[in-house]
Image (cartoon, rainbow, N blue to C red):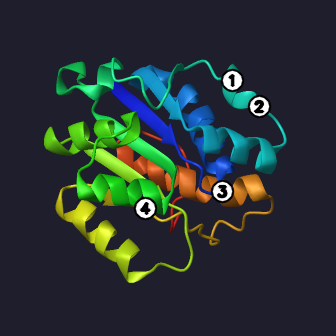
């Protein structure tokens, strides 16, 4: 049973956070706990892109950026996976530099120091050299950079199906069993 924290930043791509959380809830037989951090910018982008505030209705524990009493702010909380989706380049930079000025950066620091799974679903284009170097730093520290780059060999026909190609890949990276399209099947 996994304990997962999902962090949502203000980068474009709220659909990824929405669909990922919905899929994680469907996999509840493999998950002990799901917690979530949404930045104020993430909420604004969600409302802009998805036209609702359904993040408020998600049946997960939600924490603010300044809530350092969150269980995953310490290694003793034993969260084994953190997914930042979408992951802004500002958040990526704060994690790479080791600052822990907010709960997302602190939780990512904890996950990395405990040698647990950090998955950053990077959402930016194009990348600058600074972005690439920050990605390299996080990768060398044990994190996984999973750009929000959809695949098309499953022939998706809706925006949700396209976004789910990324979401399914992220779920695979967590180690959860997930029934999704597989190449060659």
Mark number, residue 56: 1
Q: Are marks 2 and 1 in contact (CB under 8 Å)?
A: yes
Q: Which quadrant of the figure has residue 153? A: bottom right
Query: Above or below — where is 52 with respect to 117?
Result: above
Circle 1 crowding by C-alpha within 10 Å: few under 14, some 14–19, many from 20: few
Q: Earlier in the sequence, mark 2 or mark 4?
A: 2
Q: Which quadrant of the figure has residue 77? A: top left
Mark 4 lies on a secondary structure that is loop
* Residue 118 picture location, percent across and down: 31, 47
Mark 3 → mark 1, Cα distance in angstroms: 21 Å
Q: Earlier in the sequence, mark 4 or mark 1?
A: 1
Locate residue 131 relative to residue 109 in the image: left or right. right
Mark 4 → mark 3, Cα distance in angstroms: 13 Å
Mark number, residue 163: 3
- Closer-to-camera residue (146/96): 96
Look at 80% across and 48% down and name the residue there: 48
* Residue 54 picture location, percent across and down: 74, 29
Asked whether residue 181 appears in the rendered view, the answer is no
């Amino acid at each position: 049973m996994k304990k997962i924290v999902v962090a949502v930043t203000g980068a474009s791509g709220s659909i990824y956070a929405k669909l990922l959380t919905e899929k994680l809830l469907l996999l509840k037989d493999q998950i002990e706990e799901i917690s979530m951090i949404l930045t104020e910018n993430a909420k604004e982008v969600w409302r802009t892109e998805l036209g609702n505030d359904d993040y408020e209705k998600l049946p997960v524990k939600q924490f603010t950026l300044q809530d350092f009493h969150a269980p995953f702010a310490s290694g003793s909380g034993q969260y084994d996976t953190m997914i930042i989706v979408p992951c802004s380049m500002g958040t990526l930079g704060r994690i790479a530099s080791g600052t822990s000025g907010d709960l997302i950066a602190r939780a990512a620091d904890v996950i990395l120091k405990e040698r647990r799974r950090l998955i950053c679903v990077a959402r930016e284009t194009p990348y600058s050299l600074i972005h690439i170097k920050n990605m390299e730093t996080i990768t060398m520290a044990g994190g996984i950079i999973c750009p929000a780059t959809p695949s098309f060999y499953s022939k998706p026909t809706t925006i949700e199906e396209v976004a789910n190609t990324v979401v399914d890949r992220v779920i695979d990276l967590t180690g959860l069993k997930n029934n999704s399209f597989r190449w060659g099947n």
